[in-house]
Structure formats: C-alpha cells, structure tokens
C-alpha cells in the first residue's frame, strides 16, 4: 500500500512546535464538541454524562499513544488503513478503510441533521425537511465553488469557541452560586445510585467518544513537526487530555444547571436549552449560533473530505473511474462526488436520527481504533526485540476498551454497521476476484494531487 517515492523536489519544513500540533488537534476536535451530544448521552447514560466523557478519554488516550507510535513508523501514511494493512494484513486494512468510507460519508449527514435542528430553534415554523434540504445544498454549493477554509480562519473559529465555552462556564457558575447545592447534588453527575447502570453508562460512553473524533488527524503532520518521534505522540495524547478536561467541565456544569437527565425540549439540542437556563436568552442565542457555525464549518470540510476520498478510490479504479475519478476542469474539484455526497446528506438527514448517525460514525471509528491498537501491539511487541511491558499492556488495553465500547453501541447501529461491513466484504471480493488481486485503495488525495 505504502510506496517509496524518490524525488528531488524540496520537502516540507519542520517548523511546527509541540503546542502548534496540540492547537491543530484541538481545532480538529473542536472545544464545543460535547455540546452537540450532551442530550443524547444524558438520555442513554441516565445523567452520567461526565462519567461517559471520562471513560471515553481513557480509551482515546490509550489509542492516541498507539496512533503516535505508529506515526513514527509510517510518517507519510497518517491513516489507520495504512497502519493496519501494513502491520496486520491487507484484508484487515481493507475492512478498516471501508469503515473509514462510512465515517466520511456519515460526517456531513450528521452535520446536516444538527444544523437543521439548531436552525429550527430560531425559526420553528419552517419544516425540518426544508432545513435539511437547505443545509445539504449549502454544503454542496460551497464545495462546488471550491471554497476552502484557511488555517487562519480555523484558528479564529477555535478561539471564538473557547470564548463561548468560558462565557458558558461563567454563566453556569453564577447560576449555581445563586442556588446552592448540597454534596449529594455535586456528586450525582458522576454517580447517581438511583439511576446508575453500567450497561447504560457504557452505551453512553460509546456515543460520548464522538467528542474526541478527529484527534488522529495530528498524525498527518509527521513531516512538518519538530522532533516528530516525540512530539506527534505527545500532541496526540495532550489533545485527548485537554479535550477530555474541557468536555468534563462543560457537561458537569450543564448537568448541575439542568438538575435532571430528562425533560429536554429536544435531546439533540439539549445543551442550547441548558445555556438558556444558565444565562438567559443572550446565551441561548450565542451558543446556538456558535454550534451552527461550528457544524457549518465541519459539514463543509467533511463534505469535501468524503468527496475526495471517493475521488481517490475512483482514481485508483477501486470505484468506477468514469464517475468517481474525474475532476472538474474549471474548479479542480471532484464535482460528481460532491453532488453525490450532497444527495446522501439530504437523504440521510431525512431518515437518520442524529443519535443513530453519531453511533454509526463511532461504529466505524472504533474499528479503526481497534485496528491501530492491534497494529501497535504487533509492531512494538510481537515483532520487536525490545519487549517492554508497556508495549504489551498499553495497546492491548486500548484494543479491549475500544472493543467493549464498540460492543456497547445500540443494536440498530451494530446492525446497520454490520450490513455496511458485509457489503464492503462482498464488494471487495468481487473487485479483487476473491481477494487474489491488489486490494482496494482508500488513500485521500493531497491538495497537490487533487489539482493535477
């Protein structure tokens, strides 16, 4: 899968520091990530949102170590598909890549769903289906015009999100100080003996891991970070840690403000209503706009990412090249794929719930995470002469925790995800004539490649 290329062209400069990489990771993950899933997780975990966030942080930090260590070996790959295919088996790499396709296509769908739900809080008179059509069309048109957010824009958005987080924390603390809570109230978000059930909490944790999705993108900076063997690993772990701490503070205060795990006007936009209770109409509006803008940015980027992944597969003839492997001559974008992803976002927005979409995305993500943990175990324990205990315990623990969370997903997500995997295996068997020829490629073209 990975190819060695000799070139006299100048390479990338190692100018990024450890904290540049951490900031990049936080931008990818987004500091407001737990706001979108707060209501869904609260409902599934019976109020124990902070517990699910902490369980997810434990799983993701273990997996982050594996991602960081694999980036040392494959600095140019930056993909679970490549790590698993190289270290375990091309067939397992194919399954990981097929799961990645599902994630990329689902991401613009759930952004479409969430943007539509938030928009309805402003103008409830417009039917949900109309909002779905509007946002699916917006994502499609922006990408058809070749619009791309700059790194500077992403930094400004991230800083703006941090400001909103600080404002919410301030408003929540002010609200809570005006209505003093006893010790039992302060501990209840972590553990409520009346509602706690481990299966329910683990199901919530399997959704809460969506908070951390995107941290693995740091591995793509391997050629631009100073001392990548050290800093990629540290940046990946620190991103998960900082994200987990921020998320824990947000959901803990939100739970205390709301005072219950039920009664939300809409579980998909629950955090917005919590913000309104804590700070009034101005904070309700501010958080609504922030989440709308954040999901607009994520949806636009995810839409293009899905289109480019399909283009990469079409270019390598993994999918029909005449449709998927073509680029618009004027705008230099994979127009057919952008239109297709837009149609899928519209259809998915109509028939998927936000919760099921998030669970399906995590279904694929957990497969990738399990694969990377196993790849790290094979590389650093099975094939290594330096068999330190850490090389055995960390990746296997990460694998087992991710496996348990994957199995804790609700049965509709496991069924739909299983059908997707089965379809992928059948497609791969046909495409490779019983897996006897070269495996399907899931590489995502770089900016330079996609403009040739």
Image (spheres, rainbow, N blue to C red):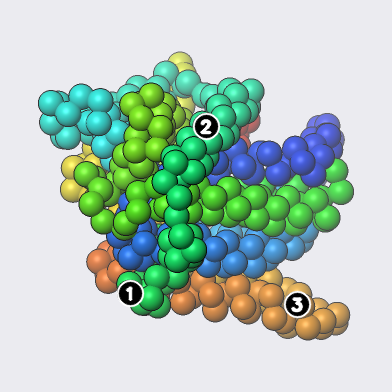
Judge from the rendering whether residue 285 lies leftward or rightward of residue 221; answer left or right. left
Residue 308 picture location, percent across and down: 47, 38
Instruction: Looking at the image, tell me whether mark 3 or mark 2 is earlier in sequence order.
Output: 2
Q: Work out how far the residue at label 1 is from the one at label 3, CA to CA, in angstroms.
A: 40 Å
Q: Work out how far the residue at label 3 is from the one at label 2, CA to CA, in angstroms.
A: 42 Å
Judge from the rendering whether residue 315 lies leftward or rightward of residue 282; answer left or right. right
Residue 203 picture location, percent across and down: 37, 69
Q: Nearer the viewer, residue 330 or 138?
A: 138
Residue 339 in sight from this viewpoint: no
Instruction: Looking at the image, tell me whether mark 1 or mark 3 is earlier in sequence order.
Output: 1
Alpha-carbon neighbours of circle 1 within 10 Å: few (<14), some, or many (≥20)?
few
Alpha-carbon neighbours of circle 2 within 10 Å: few (<14), some, or many (≥20)?
some
Residue 211 picture location, percent across and down: 49, 52
Query: Which residue is depicted at the point 75% across and 56% down?
Result: 233
* Relative height, residue 290 to residue 381 (above, below): above
Q: Residue furthest top?
A: 330
Q: Which residue is mark 1?
A: 194
Q: Work out how far the residue at label 1 is from the one at label 2, CA to CA, in angstroms.
A: 32 Å
Residue 452 picture location, percent across and down: 58, 28
Q: Which residue is mark 2?
A: 167
């Amino acid at each position: 899968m990975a190819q060695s290329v000799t070139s006299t062209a100048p390479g990338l400069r190692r100018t990024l520091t450890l904290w540049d990489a951490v900031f990049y990771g936080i931008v990818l993950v987004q500091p407001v990530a737990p706001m979108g899933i707060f209501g869904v997780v609260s409902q599934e975990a019976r109020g124990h949102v902070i517990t699910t966030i902490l369980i997810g942080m434990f799983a993701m930090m273990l997996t982050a170590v594996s991602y960081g260590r694999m980036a040392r070996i494959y600095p140019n790959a930056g993909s679970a598909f490549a790590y698993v295919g190289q270290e375990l088996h091309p067939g397992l790499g194919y399954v990981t890549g097929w799961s990645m396709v599902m994630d990329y296509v689902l991401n613009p769908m759930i952004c479409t769903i969430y943007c539509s739900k938030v928009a309805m809080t402003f103008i409830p008179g417009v039917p949900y289906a109309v909002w779905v059509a509007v946002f699916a069309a917006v994502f499609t048109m922006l990408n058809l015009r070749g619009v791309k957010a700059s790194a500077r824009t992403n930094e400004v958005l991230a800083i703006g999100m941090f400001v909103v987080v600080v404002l919410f924390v301030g408003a929540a603390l002010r609200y809570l100080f005006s209505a003093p809570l006893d010790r039992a109230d302060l501990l209840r978000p972590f553990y409520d003996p009346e509602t706690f059930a481990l299966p329910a909490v683990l199901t919530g944790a399997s959704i809460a891991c969506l908070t951390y999705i995107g941290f693995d993108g740091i591995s793509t900076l391997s050629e631009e970070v100073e001392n990548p063997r050290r800093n990629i690993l540290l940046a990946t772990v620190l991103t998960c840690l900082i994200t987990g701490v921020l998320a824990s503070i947000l959901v803990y205060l939100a739970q205390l403000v709301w005072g219950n795990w039920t009664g939300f006007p809409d579980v998909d936009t629950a955090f917005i209503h919590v913000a309104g209770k804590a700070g009034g109409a101005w904070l309700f509006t501010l958080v609504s706009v922030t989440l709308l803008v954040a999901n607009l940015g994520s949806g636009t980027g995810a839409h293009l990412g899905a289109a480019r992944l399909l283009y990469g597969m079409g270019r390598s003839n993994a999918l029909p090249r005449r449709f998927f492997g073509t680029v618009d001559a004027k705008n230099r974008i994979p127009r057919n794929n952008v239109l297709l992803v837009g149609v899928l976002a519209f259809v998915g927005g109509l028939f998927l719930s936000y919760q099921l979409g998030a669970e399906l995305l995590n279904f694929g993500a957990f497969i990738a995470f399990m694969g990377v943990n196993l790849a790290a175990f094979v590389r650093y324990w099975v094939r290594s002469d330096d068999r330190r205990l850490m090389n055995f315990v960390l990746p296997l623990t990460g694998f087992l925790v991710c496996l348990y969370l994957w199995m804790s997903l609700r049965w509709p997500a496991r069924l739909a995800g299983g059908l997707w995997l089965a379809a992928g295996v059948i497609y791969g068997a046909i495409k490779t004539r019983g897996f006897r020829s070269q495996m399907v490629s899931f590489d995502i073209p770089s900016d330079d490649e996609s403009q040739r």
